[in-house]
Amino acid sequence: MYIGGLDVGSGGCKLTISDERGNFVGTRYIPYEAKHTDRTHTIDASLILSSVGSLLSDPGVRLDALGVTSFGESFVLLDENDAILNEPMLYNDPRGSEECVTFDREKVENTCCMTPTAIYTLPKLMWTRIHRPDLMRRTKKIMLMTDFVIYTLTGERVINYSAAARTMGFDIRKKRWSEDIFAHAGIDTVLMPTPVPDGTIVGTSSKFGLSGTKIITAMHDQNAASVGAGALTPGDAVDGSGSVECLTPIVSSLPDDNGVYRAGATFQTYEEGMYSGCAMSYTGGAAVRWYRDSFGGGDSYRELDGGICSVKDNGNIDYAPGGILMMPHLAGAASPYMDPGSRALIYGMTLGSTKYDLYKAVLEGVAYEIRVNLGLLKKADIRPKRLLATGGGAKSRVWNQIKADITGLPITTSALDEVGAAGVIMSCARALGVYGSLKDAAPYFVKEADTYLPDDSRRRIYDELFGKYERMYDLSLQLR
């Protein structure tokens, strides 16, 4: 049996194939580019479909099943003939900013386990209704990206719970659309797909060269990466280290304190009765890439890492905590500040500071932000016992060690490059009845690599430095 995991991203789509025992056959990737202007950030839905078609037309093996995951929030409008009416707005498109403040904040927090912000679907749909009524008059169907691909493949209109949770209009506890919140936006829920559990078999498809392939709506892409990394128990948390740094704790119940949502943390349905959260920094890997490109002097990441650490005979990373503090708010600040106007701040440089010292400060700054968000979660009595590292940043051994030392938590990396695909395929295998649960599938798909333990001596130094770091945001407000 061969199962495909299709990940539809904002910068490209990827098809990864494995058998039901976790033996991966291969991966194909087709890149495309989003459209960015000073005022808008959009993506071409027809280009996404053509890329998906290219991937599925020649998978190399006959696919028995295909699971689909994607990013959230962005929506496609279809007319009565299923023609695409819009260019989907990405989460960072500013449209919807004025509309989001008109929602009943407490109701959204109580119902959707998030606070209203413009990144979500409903404020942008509301903007479209107000500013592009011509489009909304012609709209007969509204879909997020996973739903759009699955509808194209099967003709069925469904959305998995975890993707629905990214709309700001889904009742997390009742697992249905919130009629009241949609009514405020002026959007009829009849236009929306039907919510179904993650990992639901939707139908079969023979489109794009498929042959009776079972199509499965897997889960939101952040959940997929968490499952593939092995976060299957409350107390686990994933550090997704991409351009943004996303902390995803797994919990058995939803926080009752709306202050956690108001500070930017969000929660959505997860697997097998659990929930996943998200607290994030807008600049994780993006901050490191900015530093390398602007000040690295042509050094690679590996060379920069080598400039701040050494490797002991036993393989452990050895380095000294830095004396420079950097608050890496290079693109505003997400949780817990929720301040798009925040800017980066650097303190402690001297004439003796080198490019490696400042590079270390960038790595430490992102790690401090993780610790800040761990503090936010602690207010809701969420206390992760370990971090599972995914994304490009997890390839840096020194950064993993810095994160362990600053957070005080063990950090475990994955041996898989495609943890998101692994999560999708695990979900599919469970849906097909190969496994009774994701935990049953985990021994075949979850591949842990290295674990980085906090160093007590460095942790004590970082505890003192973190006390200073926590003051930087308030000090930055005085400079505006």
Image (cartoon, helix red, strand yellow):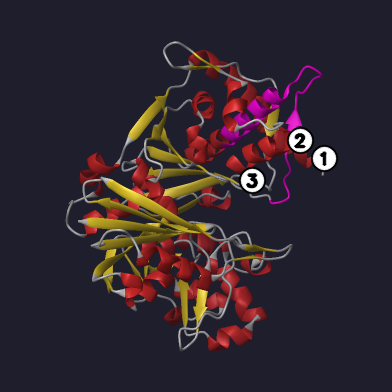
Q: Nearer the viewer, residue 228 or 346?
A: 228
Task: Give, as a single range, the part of the protein colored magenta.
Answer: 340-369
> Is tag 1's residue or tag 3's residue first in the polypeptide sequence?
3
The residue to which callout 3 is attached is 337
> Is tag 2's residue or tag 3's residue first in the polypeptide sequence?
3
Q: Could you tell me which secondary element the residue under label 3 belongs to?
A: loop
Percent from the top left, x then y, of residue 81? 46, 88
Within-10-Å neighbours for mark 2: few <14, some 14–19, many 20+: few
The Cα atoms of the two marked residues, 1 and 2, are separated by: 7 Å
Percent from the top left, x then y, of residue 390? 45, 40
Q: Is residue 112 magenta?
A: no
The residue to which callout 1 is attached is 479
Q: Is there a contact, CB below 8 Å, between mark 1 and mark 3?
A: no
Quadrant the N terminus occupies: bottom left
Percent from the top left, x then y, of residue 107? 51, 64
Tell me the residue at 43%/40% (across/down): 238
Image quadrant where residue 427 sits:
bottom left
Q: Is there a contact, CB below 8 Å, between mark 1 and mark 2?
A: yes
Side of 88 relative to 215 (left or right)? right
Q: Amino acid at mark 2?
A: Leu
Q: Nearer the viewer, residue 165 or 26?
A: 26
Q: Could you tell me which secondary element the residue under label 1 belongs to?
A: loop
The residue to which callout 2 is attached is 475
Within-10-Å neighbours for mark 3: few <14, some 14–19, many 20+: some
